[in-house]
C-alpha cells in the first residue's frame, strides 16, 4: 500500500491536510480525500490543500499565464472541489514560505478556482486579497435547528457562495444546532456556506466594526472558522449598517479573531496560519 507524506496546518482552527504534489502526479479520489480528512479513521481536517504548480494542472492554466507559480487545489472534507478557502490561502502561503518553495516579499500570488489571490504579511500573520465581492439581491429564507423561526439571510459572493443571517443575541447564536445542515429557500444551485452573526454592542468602536460568527460550511459541517465566511459576514453587516458603516472589521469565530477590510471595491482578510505536524499515512 502506498504512503503519502503530509503536513497538518490550520488558520484559527480551520484545519487542513496539506499534500505536496509539485508536478501534478497525484490523483486523489473524493473517497480518498474524505478518508484522509475523517477525524476518526484518518488524519482529520476540514479540507485538503494540494500544493501543485499551476502549469501542472488543467485548472491552473489561467493562473500560470498570470504569473502564479503555485495553485491551491482545495477539496472539502467530503472530497468535493471548492472554489476557494480564505483560511486555506493563508495556510497555503505559510507552507510555501516555510518550505522555501516561494517568497512572499512583494506579494505572493497563488492560483485558485476563484482566480489568482495575492497574499502579503500583516500584523495578524498573513493578509489575502479576496478580490471583488457582490451582495446578492433579495433574501434567502434560512431554517436552522435550534432557531424557533426561519430567518432572512443575504447572499454574498466572495469567490464562493455564502448566505449570512443576523441573530439577536449571543444566547441565540449558541442555541443554533449546526450539527445539522441549515435549509435554504430558495436553495442555491451549488449550495452555500451559511454564517450566523451577532453584531457587537456598540457595533462600531474607534472606527472598527465588530461581530461574532458561527458557520456551517457546505461539504464539511460546522467549522471553528471560515475565512471567506468571515469576510462575507462582515460585508453583510456592513451592508445592513448603511453608508456610515466602517471599512474595517474584526470577527470573532470559535477558533479565533480575524480581520476584514474593504478598499476600492475589494475585500481583504487577515489572520494567523500555523503548521502543526508532518507525517506519512497509508493511502487507501
Image (spheres, grey):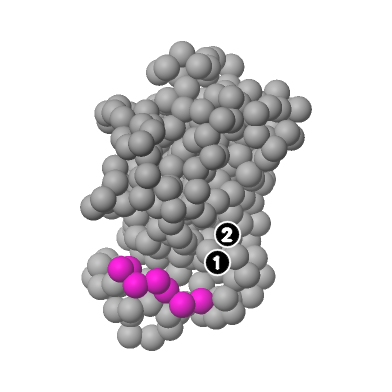
Decide: few, some or many residues near mark 2? Use Cα within 10 Å; few <14, some 14-19, many ≥20. many
C-alpha span from label 1 to label 2? 7 Å
Number of numbered markers: 2
Picture layout, residue 11 above or below residue 181:
above
The residue nearer to you, when weighing 210 against 111, is: 111
Query: Which segment did they paint magenta?
Result: 178-184
The residue nearer to you, when weighing 233 against 207, is: 233
Quarter placement of the N terminus: top left
* Magenta segment includes 181: yes
Q: Which mark is residue 161?
A: 2
* Magenta segment includes 161: no
> Tag 2 or tag 1, which sits nearer the N-term?
2
Give me the residue at 59% from left, 79% from top.
Answer: 186
Secondary-structure class at tag 2: strand
Residue 28 seen in render:
yes
Q: Position of residue 252 (x, y in %)?
A: 33, 50
Q: Position of residue 248 (x, y in %)?
A: 48, 44
Give me the residue at 42% from left, 26% from top.
Answer: 94
Give me the residue at 40% from left, 52% from top.
Answer: 34
The quarter of the picture where residue 6 lies is: top left
Q: Position of residue 229 (x, y in %)?
A: 47, 54
The quarter of the picture where residue 110 lies is: top right
Q: Residue furthest front?
A: 1
Secondary-structure class at tag 1: loop
Q: Which mark is residue 191?
A: 1
The residue nearer to you, when weighing 214 against 109, is: 109
**Magenta stretch: dominant SS?**
loop
Give me the residue at 55% from left, 51% from top.
Answer: 81
The quarter of the picture where residue 48 lies is: top left
Numbered disc in front, either 1 or 2: 1
Contact (Cβ within 8 Å) of mark 1 with mark 2: yes
Amino acid at each position: 500500500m502506498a504512503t503519502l507524506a503530509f503536513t497538518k496546518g490550520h488558520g484559527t482552527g480551520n484545519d487542513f491536510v496539506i499534500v505536496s504534489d509539485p508536478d501534478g502526479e497525484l490523483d486523489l479520489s473524493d473517497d480518498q480525500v474524505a478518508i484522509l480528512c475523517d477525524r476518526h479513521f484518518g488524519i482529520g481536517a476540514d479540507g485538503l490543500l494540494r500544493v501543485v504548480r499551476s502549469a501542472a494542472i488543467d485548472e491552473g492554466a489561467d493562473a500560470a499565464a498570470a504569473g502564479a507559480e503555485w495553485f491551491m487545489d482545495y477539496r472539502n472534507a467530503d472530497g468535493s472541489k471548492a472554489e476557494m478557502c480564505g483560511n486555506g490561502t493563508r495556510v497555503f502561503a505559510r507552507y510555501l514560505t516555510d518550505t522555501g518553495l516561494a517568497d512572499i516579499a512583494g506579494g505572493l500570488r497563488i492560483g485558485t478556482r476563484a482566480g489568482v489571490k495575492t497574499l502579503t504579511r500583516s500584523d495578524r500573520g498573513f493578509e489575502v486579497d479576496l478580490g471583488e465581492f457582490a451582495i446578492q439581491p433579495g433574501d434567502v429564507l434560512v431554517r436552522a435547528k435550534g432557531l424557533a423561526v426561519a430567518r432572512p439571510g443575504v447572499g454574498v459572493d466572495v469567490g464562493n457562495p455564502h448566505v449570512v443571517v443576523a441573530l439577536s443575541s449571543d444566547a441565540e447564536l449558541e442555541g443554533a444546532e449546526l450539527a445539522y445542515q441549515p435549509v435554504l429557500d430558495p436553495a442555491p444551485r451549488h449550495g452555500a456556506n451559511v454564517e450566523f452573526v451577532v453584531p457587537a454592542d456598540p457595533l462600531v468602536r474607534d472606527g472598527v466594526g465588530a461581530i461574532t460568527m458561527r458557520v456551517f460550511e457546505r461539504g464539511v459541517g460546522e467549522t471553528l472558522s471560515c475565512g471567506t465566511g468571515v469576510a462575507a459576514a462582515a460585508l453583510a453587516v456592513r451592508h445592513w449598517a448603511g453608508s456610515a458603516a466602517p471599512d474595517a472589521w474584526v470577527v470573532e469565530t470559535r477558533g479565533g479573531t480575524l480581520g476584514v477590510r474593504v478598499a476600492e471595491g475589494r475585500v481583504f482578510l487577515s489572520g494567523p496560519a500555523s503548521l502543526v505536524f508532518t507525517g506519512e499515512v497509508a493511502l487507501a
